[in-house]
Image (tube, rainbow, N blue to C red):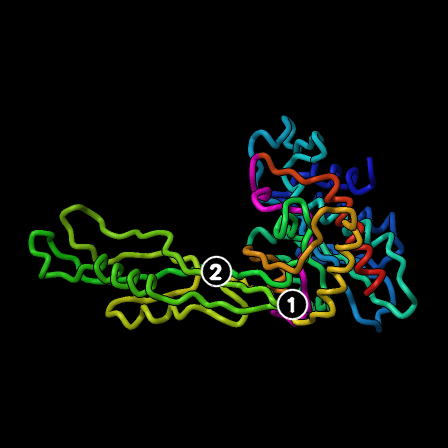
Amino acid sequence: MSDVTELTRELVSIPSHEDETEAGDFIEDWLRAETDADVTRDETGNVVARRGPDDAASLALVGHHDVVPPADSQTTADGGYVVEERDGRLYGRGTADMKGAVAAAMLAFRDATLPDSGPELVFASFVGEEQGGVGARAAIDRGFAPDYAVVGEGSTGYSAPGVTDVAVAHKGRRGSTVTARGAAAHASEPESGENAVYRACDAVDAIRDLDFPSVEVLGEEVRGSVAVTGIDGGSAWNVIPEECEVTVDERTVPGERAPLERVEEIEGVEWAVDQDLPPMRCDDEDFAETVLDAAREAQAEAESAPKLVSKPHATDAGWLAEAGTTCVVCGVAEPGEAHTKDESASVEVLERCYEVYRGVAERF
């Protein structure tokens, strides 16, 4: 069994959907035992390690060690997580999202041979990514600001099955609520009230007519979307509703937002943003090509070569990019693997990501 497979097994076996402390302890202890790096653990629970000259440009290998709640089949009787290997894959909560990439980054951080001129190599594993980037935002607030970062979220299987690509952009997510207010009345006399559902429907029509923003990032088109995902209004079948709420899911693109504020031009309608996870755009083509070269070398025998791609899901790379770090995303997970009851990761891809991360550090 390879080092990255064994380390992934150990990490995945540690529960971290409600409390990431034990997983953070394991990562911190391993880094202190296996490297001579400067290892810190902040009060939020983030683990950060640094090696190399601190006056050089910094390159971070970034992941997170929290996971979404497991299915019953993914837990043991004593509360641990089940980890199984079969048919060349590791199965278990967090194998794909994203303890496999964290393990690969830990080993690459330890093993990379750095020239005296740098870079300063940084390893970071954050808490609370699944809760909207809690750990990443806390670290940034405390001054975490690498010049460049490879974020180990999934990028495998985008250009072709089994190929580990390099994502140079991803969408963000803005979740919002449109609230329509009217005046209640008996339904037998609807003209004596103001129907909030009708006003909400006018807002839905306005949303449906919006154009979706689109941008190009290093030759990749990234197209946003807006969708109404819920509507709730009315209190009884014989009462004209005085309030109606509409939930809206918007997938944002770098530098653009759909003009959802237009719904407030409708009488009695208000719009409020509930969550805004930022998109990511790589702003340095040379860095993207450096990571792509490492990805090509790590899978030189594959039928298809990796490509620069875009990714539909928000990640901590969005928060880092917003704070000024040049980012790409490159990692283990394949589309459809994360957050499932059969979550798994290819052993071959785990080992490949170790080679990619190490290769980036050594050729940076």
Front residue of 192/252: it is 252
Query: Residue 79: x and y, percent?
Result: 63, 32
Q: Secondary structure at mark 1?
A: loop
**Which residue corresponds to the image point at 62% horizontal and 59% vertical from the top-left?**
309
Closer to us: 353 or 265: 353
Residue 228, image quadrant: bottom left
Residue 40 seen in the current view? no
Q: Please state which amino acid type lies under the numbered disc 1.
A: Cys
| Relative side of 156 to 207, left or right | right
User: Distance between the Cα atoms at labels 1 and 2?
Assistant: 18 Å
Observer-nearest of 25 and 104: 104
- Residue 282's tag is 1
Any part of residue 259 in sight: yes
> Which residue is painted at 61% across and 67% down in the image?
219
User: Reading the chain from its start, which is encountered first: label 1 or label 2?
Assistant: 2
Measuring from the top left, give residue 344's x and y in whole percent: 64, 38
Q: Is residue 332 magenta?
A: yes
Q: Amino acid at mark 2?
A: Arg
Q: Residue at position x 39%, y 67% from top?
A: 211
Location of the N terminus by quadrant is top right
Label 1: how many Cα within 10 Å (few below 14, some 14–19, many 20+): many
**Residue 199 versus residue 138: which sits nearer the camera?**
199
What crowding class fits label 2: few (fewer than 14 Cα within 10 Å), some (14-19), or many (20 or more)?
Answer: many
Range covered by the magenta-colored residues: 321-341
Residue 251 marker:
2
Q: Residue furthest right?
A: 116
